[in-house]
C-alpha cells in the first residue's frame, strides 16, 4: 500500500477567500464581500449548503482580520508545508514507517479517549450504585426504627390489655349457675317431681323451673350388700330394691343463688341432700372474687390452707365450708360472699332482695342463650347413665 501524505488542515481561510498569504486587510474584506454575495442564502434558495458556505466565509474573514490569530494560522501553515516537503524527500520505506507511526499515534489517542470515557462511565455507575446503597441503608435504618417503635408500642398496649384483663372478671360458663342434687327418695317422698324440688330449693334464689332435670331410679347396691340380701331372704331383697335415688340438675337464675346452695351443703347433707356443682368444679368467677377479697373479705393469699377433718376447717367442691351454726340454720347472711348476692339459709325465710350489677346482667344474658342447649345435654347424659345402670 502506497504511503499516505500528511493530513491537510481542515479549512484553509486563504483558499476559501481566494487570497494569498501576503494579502492586506482591504483585499481580504473585498474578497469576502465578493464571494459572500455569490453564496448568500437569499440568492441561492435552491442550494441546501448555501448557509453553510456563507458561514465558512464569515469565519475565515474574521480569522484573517485578527492579527494574532492570523499569525498563528500562518505558522501552522508553514509547519504543514515544511512537513509535506520533508515527507516528499523520504523514500518509500521511510514514508511507510512515518505513516504507520502516525496511524498508531492516532489509534493510541483514540483508545486513550475511549478508556477515559469508559472509566468515567464506570465511575458514574459506581457513584450511582453507592448512592443507591446509601439510600437503601437509610431506608433499612428507618424501617428498623419504625419496627422498634412499633414493638415498644405493641408491648405497651399488651401491658395495658393485660392489666385490664387482670382486673376484669372471667366470663361466666354455661354451668356456673347450675347445681347437681342427689338424695334418697324415701327421705323426701314429696320431692318426686321437678316442680316440688324447685319449690324446696327456691329459698336460695330464683330457679329456671323449665330447665330442671330430675331422674329417679333404684339404688344400685354394692356386691357385699347383695350377698347379705341373698342370705337374709326375699323380704329384705324386696326392701333393698325399693330404695330409690333421685338425681337432679337445678339451674339457678344467678350464681349467687347456686353459691348459697353449695355453701349450705353441710346442713343439707345432714338432712340427706347432697349438693355439688354441675360442672364438677368451682366457677372461675368465685376464685376471682376471692382473690380480690370480695369473697370472705380477704384475698385468697390470706385464707388458711384446708386441713384434715380432725377439727380444722375443710373445703367442699373448692368453696370453704360454712360452719354449721345456729345462725346459719336460722337464715343468717353469707359473710363470705359479696353483699350483691342473696342469703341462703336452709329454712324458708322471706326472699332477700339482691341488687343487680353489670356482672349479673351478663350472667343472665349468657344463661338465656345457653339454657336450651344445657337442658338437652343434661337430659341426654341422665338417659345415657340410666341406660348403663350407673349413678349420675
Image: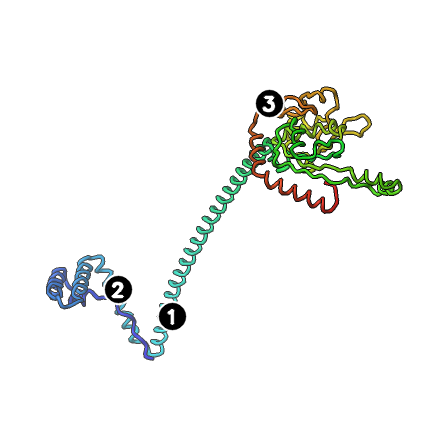
For marks 2 and 3, give the one nearer the viewer.
Answer: 3
Q: CA distance from mark 1 to mark 3?
A: 118 Å
For marks 1 and 3, give the one nearer the viewer.
Answer: 3
**Alpha-carbon neighbours of circle 3 within 10 Å: few (<14), some, or many (≥20)?**
few
Tell me residue 99's x, y (percent): 34, 73
Q: Quadrant of residue 360?
A: top right
Whether residue 27 is visible, yes or no, is no
Q: Secondary structure at mark 2?
A: helix
Q: Tell me if label 1 and label 2 are in contact, CB under 8 Å.
A: no
Q: Secondary structure at mark 1?
A: helix
Q: Is residue 103 above or below residue 233?
A: below
Q: Quadrant of residue 192?
A: top right
Q: Is residue 7 above or below residue 183?
A: below
Disc nearer the start of the sequence (1/2) = 2
Q: CA distance from mark 2 to mark 3?
A: 126 Å
On the image, numbered disc 1 is attached to which residue? 104
Front position in the image: 140 or 337: 337
Whether residue 117 is visible, yes or no, is yes
On the image, numbered disc 3 is attached to which residue? 353
Q: Is residue 223 above or below residue 184?
A: below
Front position in the image: 193 or 134: 193
Residue that appears at 64% across and 43% down: 377
Disc nearer the start of the sequence (2/3) = 2
Q: Is residue 157 above or below residue 16?
A: above
In the shown orientation, is residue 279 left or right of residue 103? right
Q: Secondary structure at mark 3?
A: loop
Q: CA distance from mark 1 to mark 2?
A: 23 Å
On the image, numbered disc 2 is attached to which residue? 76
Total labels drawn: 3
| Quarter containing the C terminus | top right
Amino acid at each position: 500500500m502506497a504511503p499516505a501524505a500528511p493530513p491537510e488542515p481542515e479549512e484553509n481561510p486563504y483558499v476559501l477567500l481566494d487570497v494569498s498569504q501576503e494579502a492586506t486587510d482591504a483585499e481580504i474584506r473585498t474578497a469576502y464581500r465578493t464571494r459572500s454575495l455569490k453564496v448568500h442564502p437569499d440568492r441561492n434558495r435552491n442550494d441546501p449548503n448555501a448557509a453553510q458556505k456563507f458561514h465558512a466565509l464569515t469565519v475565515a474573514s474574521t480569522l484573517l482580520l485578527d492579527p494574532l490569530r492570523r499569525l498563528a494560522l500562518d505558522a501552522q501553515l508553514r509547519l504543514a508545508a515544511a512537513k509535506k516537503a520533508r515527507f516528499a524527500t523520504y523514500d518509500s520505506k521511510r514514508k511507510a514507517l512515518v505513516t504507520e507511526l502516525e496511524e498508531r499515534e492516532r489509534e493510541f489517542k483514540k483508545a486513550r479517549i475511549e478508556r477515559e470515557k469508559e472509566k468515567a462511565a464506570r465511575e458514574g455507575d459506581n457513584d450511582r450504585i453507592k448512592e443507591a446503597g446509601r439510600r437503601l441503608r437509610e431506608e433499612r435504618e428507618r424501617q428498623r426504627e419504625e419496627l422498634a417503635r412499633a414493638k415498644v408500642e405493641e408491648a405497651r398496649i399488651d401491658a395495658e390489655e393485660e392489666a385490664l384483663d387482670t382486673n376484669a372478671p372471667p366470663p361466666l360458663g354455661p354451668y356456673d349457675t347450675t347445681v347437681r342434687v342427689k338424695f334418697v327418695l324415701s327421705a323426701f317422698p314429696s320431692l318426686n317431681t321437678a316442680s316440688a324440688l324447685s319449690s324446696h330449693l327456691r329459698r336460695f334464689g330464683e330457679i329456671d323451673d323449665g330447665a330442671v332435670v330430675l331422674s329417679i331410679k333404684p339404688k344400685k347396691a354394692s356386691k357385699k350388700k347383695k350377698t347379705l340380701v341373698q342370705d337374709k331372704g326375699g323380704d329384705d331383697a324386696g326392701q333393698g330394691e325399693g330404695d330409690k335415688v333421685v338425681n337432679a340438675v337445678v339451674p339457678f337464675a344467678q350464681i349467687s343463688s347456686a353459691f348459697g346452695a353449695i355453701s349450705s351443703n353441710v346442713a343439707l347433707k345432714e338432712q340427706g341432700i347432697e349438693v355439688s356443682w354441675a360442672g364438677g368444679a368451682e366457677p372461675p368467677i368465685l376464685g376471682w372474687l376471692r382473690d380480690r377479697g370480695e369473697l370472705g373479705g380477704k384475698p385468697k393469699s390470706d385464707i388458711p390452707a384446708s386441713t384434715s377433718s380432725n377439727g380444722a376447717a375443710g373445703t367442699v367442691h373448692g368453696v370453704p365450708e360454712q360452719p354449721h351454726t345456729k345462725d346459719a340454720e336460722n337464715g343468717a347472711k353469707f359473710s363470705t360472699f359479696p353483699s350483691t348476692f342473696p342469703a341462703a339459709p336452709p329454712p324458708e325465710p322471706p326472699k332477700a332482695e339482691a341488687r343487680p350489677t353489670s356482672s349479673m346482667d351478663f350472667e343472665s344474658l349468657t344463661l338465656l342463650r345457653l339454657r336450651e342447649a344445657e337442658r338437652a345435654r343434661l337430659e341426654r347424659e341422665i338417659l345415657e347413665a340410666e341406660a348403663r345402670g350407673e349413678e349420675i
